[in-house]
Image (cartoon, helix red, strand yellow):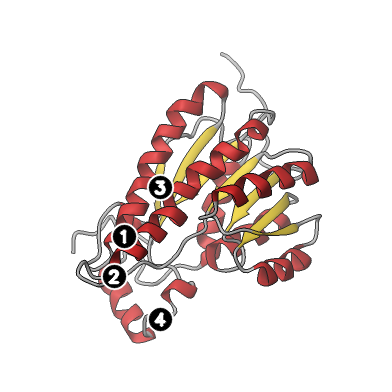
Amino acid sequence: MNELPDRSRSIAGRVAIVTGAASGMGRATARLFASEGAHVAMTDIDATACAVLAAECGNGAKAYALDVADKDAIARVVAQIAEDFGGVDILVNNAGVSSFCALDDDAYEDIWHRALAVMLTAHQRMVRAALPHLRQSDAARIVNIASTEGLGATPGDTPYVAAKTGVTGLTRGLAVDLGPEGITCNCICPGPISTAMTDKVPDDHKVIFAKRRTALKRYGDPEEVAQMTLSLVLPAASYITGAVIPVDGGLMARNA
């Protein structure tokens, strides 16, 4: 019988980029990666909050101001990260924006373009900017954060739904294109998670929704999404690619 090669279950010493790292799932992911010994490049449009997080995490973590809707800024910041850390092993495309908007709202076009720019176009730009460096890694990993809104839809949320559905397709396409090089690309679809994006939802509404729609009867924590992200970026996760994984407390498993 063929012996399986030794596959590390550690990201210690790996260089990871996490976008949207100043809050929510991005913050939880950056903190978890740093606690696991990775060197984390944390990017966010909120440079101050990102810098505070990097200082808290230690282990060589660095903060970078980045609006992922800015094509030139992506190229510049990723190049700087690769220079500062000597390469890139892991990319987590997490940055996102809330995009609820009615179809007949005057602001719809602007919200639509911003949603796709931040949550879809930016993903491929980050991947393409990081690709020369990922190709030098012996365990290159890409994780795109989508949403269960990419698997279904909520009324009044078409910009967000379109962007997140695009992320699931982009993930599969990247997995196919990059697979021959050993670079994996997977997608996580969080369900109802307690983040700044859901803070506007009244607590009693959250309880009602969670009990009615999720198998676990509760909202999730950002750390629970971060743990799945960690699992997908391990060197040992070498035969998982093109996967679209709900982390949703059983939301998509329920019919009613």
Residue at horizontal 56%, vertical 44%? 126
Question: Which residue has dot 2 on it?
Answer: 101
Q: Which of marks 3 and 1 is in front?
A: 1
Residue 188 location in percent, x, y? 44, 50
Q: Please tell me how crowded label 4 is: few (under 14), some (14-19), or many (20+) other residues with Cα within 10 Å.
A: few
Which of the pair 241/178 is nearer the observer? 178
Question: Which residue has dot 1 on it?
Answer: 159
- Mark 2 near mark 4, Cβ–Cβ under 8 Å? no
**Label number found at residue 200:** 4
* Quadrant holding the N terminus: top right
The quarter holding residue 197 reads bottom left
Q: Nearer the viewer, mark 2 or mark 3?
A: 2
Q: Residue furthest top?
A: 1
Q: Which amino acid does label 4 sit on?
A: Lys
Is the residue 67 above or below the residue 4 in the image? below
* Quadrant holding the C terminus: bottom left
Question: Which residue has dot 3 on it?
Answer: 245
Q: Which is nearer the N-term, disc 2 or disc 3?
A: 2
Q: Which amino acid does label 3 sit on?
A: Ile
Is the residue 19 above or below the residue 125 in the image? below
- Mark 2 near mark 1, Cβ–Cβ under 8 Å? yes
Cα separation between marks 4 and 1: 19 Å
Q: What residue type is labelled 2?
A: Cys
Residue at horizontal 40%, vertical 33%? 173
Residue at horizontal 40%, vertical 81%? 200
Q: Which of marks 2 and 4 is in front?
A: 2
